[in-house]
Image (cartoon, coloured by chain):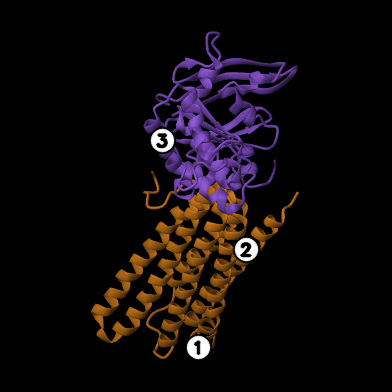
Amino acid sequence: MDNPVIQIADVNFWYGTKQALFDVNVAIAPHQTTAFIGPSGCGKSTLLRCLNRMNDLITGTRVTGRIALNGDDVYAPEVDVIELRKRVGMVFQKSNPFPKSIFDNVAYGLRIQGLTDKTELEGRVMKSLKKAALWDEVQDRLHDSALMLSGGQQQRLCIARAIAVEPEIILMDEPCSALDPTATAKIEELIQDLETDYTIVIVTHNMQQAARCSDYTAFFYLGRLVEFDATNKIFTNPTNKQTEDYVTGRFG
Amino acid sequence: MELHFDQELTQAKDLLLRMSSLAEQAVVTALKGLVQRDDALAQSVLDGDSQLDNLQKEIDERCVELIALRQPKARDLRFLIVIMKIAAELERVGDQAVNIAHRATALNREPQLKPFVDIPRMSDLSCGMIRTVLDAFVYGKIDVARQVIRNDDEVDRLETQMHRELTSFMIEDPHTITRALSLIGVAHSLERIGDHAVNIAEEVVYLYEGRDIRHQSPNA
């Protein structure tokens, strides 16, 4: 693949003595959505959390191999992890807005980056909320608490917050698993819209979701990457028997 | 572990197999109506065609329902799509049997033009192709499906031969034109049945290999 946003090469990962990833190689294409699928414990979330070094927060973990973000080694000793997480946005399973206003949630990262100009701040907040398909619903109450929003709106707010700082890639860890079908559909639409500007990696248990909103799919099993291909290939005619059995619901 | 879904797939397949045996039976019976000059046999084909039509509708309905409710993927998805397509081909095989039965009824009113030699051969070949290709579908015999595609050349050759022969009859004696045209129609129906078998064979390859080999030369 030419110019992948993230190049994952020979990655192994351990929680203490337990190895969770084995020699994983994946390239994440720019302006595409890549889905990681597989049964529980297959390593898909572990790999996702390697990409912005979230696993550093867990003691006793160890990683080998190389993960490059637009060519820069994510695990190089000189890397400032805070800086890295600005470049790699993340959206979690459970929406986690700060107990602040809607506006302040989206402005948070921008203010930390030192943006103080009020007009520019307002412009960037509006742009992010529009991109996250939330603007129409909240424009009249930007200074209400974010916690007043519904679950689906909170999750879109978290996406707005993530994209406000214009990351190079957005990681989503089961972003819809706590949402109802309507809110899920909105997030899925949003994922497809965001592709124009962003590269997205999504971990999901919901295979239909992977099929609906990703361009590439990686299937993991027991810590190994079993198959990586275009999503339409994985869901119509996978090469590997294990992948076939998993996507047709016969194991996993 | 067999899933409920597997049972539903098997049921859809069983309906298709019932359809194929009815379609083949219809062709054989229509041809007997012609060769044995038996109007009752021809009529039974006309009466029985609605069974095939209804089975096709039932298969489509089941497949659409399973696609909507189960969201099948990969091989399961191909399986259901292919079943619907094969059902459509078999329904047309039934229609060709009806065409032959109509011609038989007309021809039975006239003196026999010539002994039936090539028509039963064509019928054996094309019905054999249908039977064989359904076998390939059930047991995943891709080589057999590909052989069916190649066998179609022989059916085509026989049709051309009959065409030539019946044309010479018509040139010699214009009184034979109506009967000769009817026999050409029968040969054409049998040739079309061979084509339906080829279409089914292509779907069988798609089902098991995931490759679309339609509209290619056989050597590609």
Looking at numbered disc 1 in the image, what kind of residue is underneath it? Asp
Q: Return the residue nearer the eye: B120 or A251.
A: A251
Q: How far, Cα to Cα, is label 3 from label 1?
A: 87 Å
Instruction: Report helix, strand or loop for mark 3.
Output: helix
Q: Chain of mark 2?
A: B
Left or right: residue B54 versus residue A71 is right
What secondary structure is found at the residue carrying circle 2?
A: helix
Residue A103 spot, x, y in % from top left:
49, 37
- Judged from this view, the residue extending furthest toward the bottom is B109
Image location of residue B15, percent across then percent down: 62, 67
C-alpha separation, residue under disc 3 versus residue under disc 2: 59 Å
Say whether residue B20 is visible: no
Q: Chain of mark 1?
A: B
Query: Is the same chain shared between marks 1 and 2?
Result: yes
Residue B178 or residue A95, whichever sits in front: A95
Residue B102: horizontal and vertical position, in percent? Answer: 43, 83
Say which mark, if any, is on residue B12. Answer: 2
- Secondary structure, mark 1, is helix
Q: Is residue A106 above or below residue B199?
A: above
Badges 1 and 2: C-beta atoms under 8 Å apart? no
Q: Residue at x 40, y 48 (%)?
A: B218
The label shown at residue A122 is 3
Shown in orange, the chain is B
* Badge 1 or badge 2: first in the primary sequence: 2
Task: Report the chain shown in purple.
Answer: A
Which residue is located at x 50 percent, y 46 percent? Answer: A141
In this rendering, the answer to whether A182 lies above or below A63 is below
Q: Amino acid at mark 3?
A: Glu
Q: Which residue is mark 1?
A: B39
Between the C-alphas of marks 1 and 2, the distance is 34 Å
Q: Is residue B192 above or below residue A221?
A: below
How crowded is the residue under tag 3: few (<14 C-alpha within 10 Å), some, or many (20+)?
some
